[in-house]
Image (spheres, grey):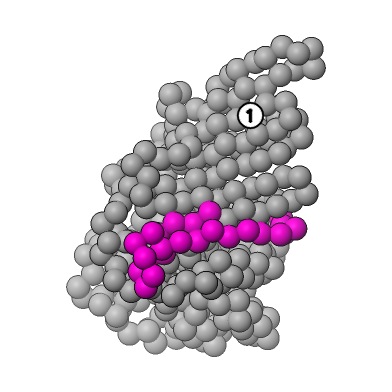
Amino acid sequence: MTTKLILGFIGNGKSANRYHLPFILSRADKILTKTIYSATASRDRWPQLPGVTYTDNLDVLLGDPEIQVVVVSTPSALHYDFALKVLQAGKHCVVEKPFTHTEEEAQTLFNVAKEKGLMVQCYQNRRFDSDFLTTQKVIESGKLGDLLEVEMHYDYYRPSVPESVKEFSAINSYLYGHGCHTLDQVISYFGVPDHVRYDVRQLLGDGRMNDYFDVDMYYGTLKVSVKSSYFRVKERPSFVAYGKKGMFIKYSKDKQEHHLKLFYMPDNVDFGQDAPEDYGVLTWMDNTGVYHEEKVVTEQGDYARYYDALYETLINGKEKLVKDDETLLQIKLLETGISGLN
């Protein structure tokens, strides 16, 4: 029989029900969600899952000896306090992104976990986005030659979001809320940059929401740029990679989030899959000076792979997927990038 990993959740909102539970359910043979805590449990709008206990008493969750790991999926400002309570209760902890507000808070959580022989880790499911995985495949094919530049865009046209926010908050900024996806992708694949340049703005003026960022990370001659805006009426490509011999462009983003918003779940065989018109295009010159252009079949994204890795760590003793140093670096970049705003 497979040893099951028993989970609990703090928070019963969009994060838990859209980006965690559907993928955990796809791994029901080895992962079980037992209890979900929410301060507003009786009024939560998401349908309750059969066999799961819903409670507004945190002690019911933290006092259950069967629950091995607790996932913190609350609003960002509450991540640190709840994660600390979970660790102090003697349980492993997964924390939604952004992990914490400051590098100091992140280091405190890692220190407490180490002292108690526990694991705490950030939920970086976007490492398993199909567009990111496909770009890696192209880079590793060698057809681009020496890599010179990578651009990553995460754009919306949602002026109503920043226009509705009348005061500045670092933890609720666009950089923290979306840079936590893309900066982790850069760190996980390219490592620690030599240096970083920040252009983080409040397009509506001082004292308003951060609604734009452009972060350039340098690795020798390679520049990796992470760019996002709420005011792009037409999105820029998700990924563009340039090398000495060619380029790759992938316009459309990973489809998993789009399908989840439509309540089209991972148990569908074509969940998250690109159609041929969504494939990226690779243009390159071979060693004889002949140009080639080809579509690249999109790699399959799957956020459940985060939970596969978590299972291997907590049940089979494998190394953590998201390393402490990677999380600390990311929080440092976020904290530094937002520091000039108010």
Q: Residues within 10 Å of mark 1 (few under 14, many from 20)?
A: many
Q: Position of residue 262 (x, y in %)?
A: 28, 44
Q: Which residue is depicted at the point 52% across and 33% down?
A: 250
Q: Quadrant of residue 288?
A: top right
| SS at mark 1 in the image | strand
Query: In the visual, does 335 lie left or right of 328?
Result: left
Q: Is residue 37 above or below residue 197?
A: below
Specify the quadrant that holds the C terminus. bottom left
Q: Which residue is depicted at the point 39% across and 87% down?
A: 59
Query: In the visual, does 315 lie left or right of 251?
Result: right
Q: Is residue 112 above or below residue 191?
A: below
Let me know if residue 49 is in the magenta part.
Answer: no
Q: Which residue is depicted at the point 75% across and 58% down?
A: 194
Q: Position of residue 184 (x, y in %)?
A: 59, 57
Instruction: Find disc 1 in the rendering and name its residue.
Output: 247
Q: Which residue is depicted at the point 61% across and 81% down?
A: 104
Given the image, on which type of amino acid does mark 1 rest?
Answer: Met
Query: In the visual, does 175 lie left or right of 18?
Result: right
Q: Quadrant of residue 45?
A: bottom left
Residue furthest to the front in view is: 205
What's the magenta region? 191-214
